[in-house]
């Protein structure tokens, strides 16, 4: 038993990066391309946790496009290794989002879920960068709410409130599906929104590319395929 009655829900909203797109492998590769030998001794998790700190800092102040958030995050990580990245390297890192792979189960699970639910995405990204990622997912979302459109980044409640306005359903008919406790489940709890934690890092220590946080989702699954299996019974 899942503890959730999926018949309650008409719409599913998803986080994208970390949930549908494997941003940790994408970020790690892009960081190593810049750091080269200087970062060779650092583990992927060390690099990701450093990235998470700088990204959260950049997203918490006055709104910046996500390309600039990535640029500042890269410069912060590189500074810890005594590196000043070139403008060319910064531009390449900021545009690397389109190269980040989808999790292998994401396209198939989304296609299955779309037969039963209306789908939306609430993502901390620019419109053009998300469009590149969406090509890897192979699904048409009925609602796409980006940080660029809102002028703010999750965990701001405004991103979810804009989604509620566009979806036009009572929030008890919406289920949010996400990996990040910090960006997604903490604000979902504050808003009374039911949520499913796709714990892509299950069995691995640390928080990876997201800052640590504490929240109690309504259901935890290890991947999107498992969620689809449960939701479509």
Image: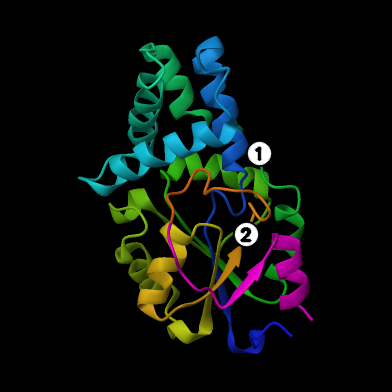
Q: Is residue 2 left or right of residue 10?
A: right
The chosen color scheme is rainbow
Mark 2, residue position: 199
| Residue 84 picture location, percent across and down | 35, 12
As rendered, which of 21 and 78 lies closer to the eye?
A: 78
| Residue 193 picture location, percent across and down | 45, 78
Q: Tag 1's secondary structure?
A: loop
Mark 1, residue position: 101
Give me the residue at 33% from left, 29% from top: 72
Nearer the observer: mark 2 or 1; the answer is 2
- When the figure is inspected, residue 148 is found, relative to residue 187, above or below; the finding is above
User: Which quadrant: the N terminus?
Assistant: bottom right
| Mark-to-mark CA distance, 2 and 1 | 17 Å
- When the figure is inspected, residue 195 is found, relative to residue 44, above or below; the finding is below
| Residue 57 picture location, percent across and down | 29, 42
- Going by the picture, which residue comes out furthest to the left? 62
Q: Is residue 214 left or right of residue 226?
A: left
| Residue 148 picture location, percent across and down | 34, 48
Residue 97 visible, this angle:
no
Give me the residue at 47% from left, 39% from top: 49
Q: Residues within 10 Å of mark 1 (few under 14, many from 20)?
A: some
Q: Which residues are magenta?
A: 213-233
């Amino acid at each position: 038993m899942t503890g959730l009655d999926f018949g309650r829900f008409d719409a599913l909203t998803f986080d994208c990066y970390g949930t549908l797109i494997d941003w940790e492998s994408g970020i790690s590769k892009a960081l190593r391309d810049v750091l080269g030998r200087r970062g060779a001794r650092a583990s992927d998790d060390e690099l990701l946790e450093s990235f998470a700190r700088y990204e959260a800092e950049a997203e918490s102040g006055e709104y910046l496009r996500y390309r600039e958030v990535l640029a500042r995050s890269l410069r912060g990580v590189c500074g810890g290794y005594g590196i000043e990245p070139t403008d060319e390297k910064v531009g390449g890192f900021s545009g690397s989002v389109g190269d980040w792979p989808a999790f292998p189960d994401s396209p198939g699970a989304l296609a299955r879920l779309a037969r039963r639910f209306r789908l939306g995405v609430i993502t901390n990204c620019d419109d053009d960068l998300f469009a590149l990622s969406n090509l890897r997912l192979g699904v048409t979302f009925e609602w796409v709410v980006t940080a660029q459109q809102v002028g703010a980044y999750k965990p701001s409640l405004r991103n979810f409130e804009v989604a509620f306005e566009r979806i036009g359903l009572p929030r008890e008919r919406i289920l949010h599906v996400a990996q990040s406790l910090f960006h997604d489940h903490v604000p979902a709890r504050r808003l009374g929104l039911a949520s499913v934690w796709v714990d892509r890092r299950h069995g691995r220590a640390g928080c990876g590319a997201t800052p640590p946080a504490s929240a109690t989702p309504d259901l935890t699954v290890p991947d999107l395929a498992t969620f689809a299996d449960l939701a479509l019974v």
